[in-house]
Amino acid sequence: MTRHQVVVLRRGDRGLAVADVCDRLVITGDLPADWVASAGPRDSVEFDEEVEHAVKSFQQRRGLLVDGVVGRSTYSVLDGARWSLGDRVLRYLPGHPLEGDDVAQLQARLAELGFSPGKIDGIHAGATDTALRHFQAGVGLDADGTLGPDTMRAFVALRRSVTGGSAIALQEREYIRRGGYSLSGRTIVLDPGHGGDDPGTTGFGLIESDLALDLAQRIEGRLTAHGVGVVFTRTSGPGGEEVERATLANSIDADLLLSIHTDHTDHSDRSAGIAAHGAATFFYGQGEERGEPPGDQPSAGPGATAGPGRGWSVIGERFADLLLREVVARSGLTDCRTHPRSWPLLRRTRMPAVRLDIGYLSHPSDVAVLSNSHTLDRIAEGVVVALQRLYLGEADTGHTGMLRLVDLRRHLESIGMGQAGHARQPRQGR
């Protein structure tokens, strides 16, 4: 079963496709080594409870949607997990980029050596090809963009000489610093979830797709007033699959993407539906939820939670944290924390991308908050304040939930005046 032939597999299915998935789960360590051999003929291998548990374990570890179902996104990551750097020849194939853990390990290695491949996403695209060619030229090899034996030997010969910190994290922070404090001139993509024939979740009279678009339009008005260029992935119609939305954001070279959704729980369990409530944010990251990117930790094998090659967007994490705190402070919604995920939209965008889940439409109190137009205005202001605080970086001295847009404008003006005054000061003689 290739990446292009994948079908949706779930508990109760049987056949060669299920056996193919189980082969990969053995490689990742989620099924025991002798599982496939003891499962009987390959054409009758069953997707049973043990396989479902193994799939969920893999999904949880890789930041995927934990549903125990093997669809396109899960299979793509699962199929790539069988490769380690050096297992196969890597090269850039426009239109059909190679994906896998070996690509992510290559990206991490290039970043450590000072050749930026962009986001460590395990996708061998143009930025990775360029970084690899620059590395090859730098060590005196033919810069053909092919990772073969000679380039692998060059990697082995070069050991990281500086430790203590992530190269990608440093590059992302420097990118923010060089961009300046102002929002003016930046391009932000707003992605209202679902749309068209897909309304998303519904509850107590609210529809997720309509609410997401309403909030996105309120955010747009405030951003454009600050000179920000705003692009929507959709307006009244459908926005396409997550991969299509990521492609749109990449095509315009946006500075940041914000995806807006609501959450819900199964109404068949009324007590659980009432209990689950609050807002959460998500950014691109693979591995355990902790303060340091997993890519800084030693490798523990192809099925490990952390190790070289695990992607982690430092800027995405920072914005997700600022965004959630501002939204919670302004709305009164429960703080359901910030989480790393490797969902397609977060993984395949070249710029930092964050998803905001703004409450549960299965919870009456959350619906009451989201039904209030003034609260939505406050949330929209909180989004813009969080975005401005992201670009202020170390100059951010505000308190969460206390700043208004006018306060930030005054703060920016004072920073500009201070810098101008410093530039006019004559140098002291030595």
Image (cartoon, rainbow, N blue to C red):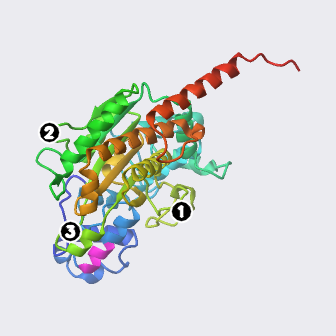
State the residue position of label 1. 299
**Mark whose residue sits in front, 1 or 2:** 2
Residue lying furthest left: 197
Where does residue 231 sit, x and y in percent of width and height? 29, 32
Q: Where does the image place residue 149, in percent across and percent down from the top left?
A: 50, 48
Can residue 236 be seen here? Answer: yes
Classify mark 2: helix, strand or loop.
loop
Q: How many marks?
A: 3
Image coordinates of residue 3 in percent, x first then y, are 25, 54
Q: Secondary structure at mark 3?
A: loop
Q: Which residue is mark 3?
A: 266
- The residue type indicated by label 1 comes to Ser
Mark 1 crowd level (few <14, some 14–19, many ≥20, 10 Å Cα): some
Which element type, helix, strand or loop, lies under badge 1? loop
Which SS type dominates the magenta stretch? Answer: helix
Gap in Å between the C-alphas at discs 3 and 2? 27 Å
The region drawn magenta spans: 49-54
**Does label 1 or label 2 sit earlier along the sequence?**
2
Instruction: Tell which of 178 and 68 is nearer to you.
Output: 178
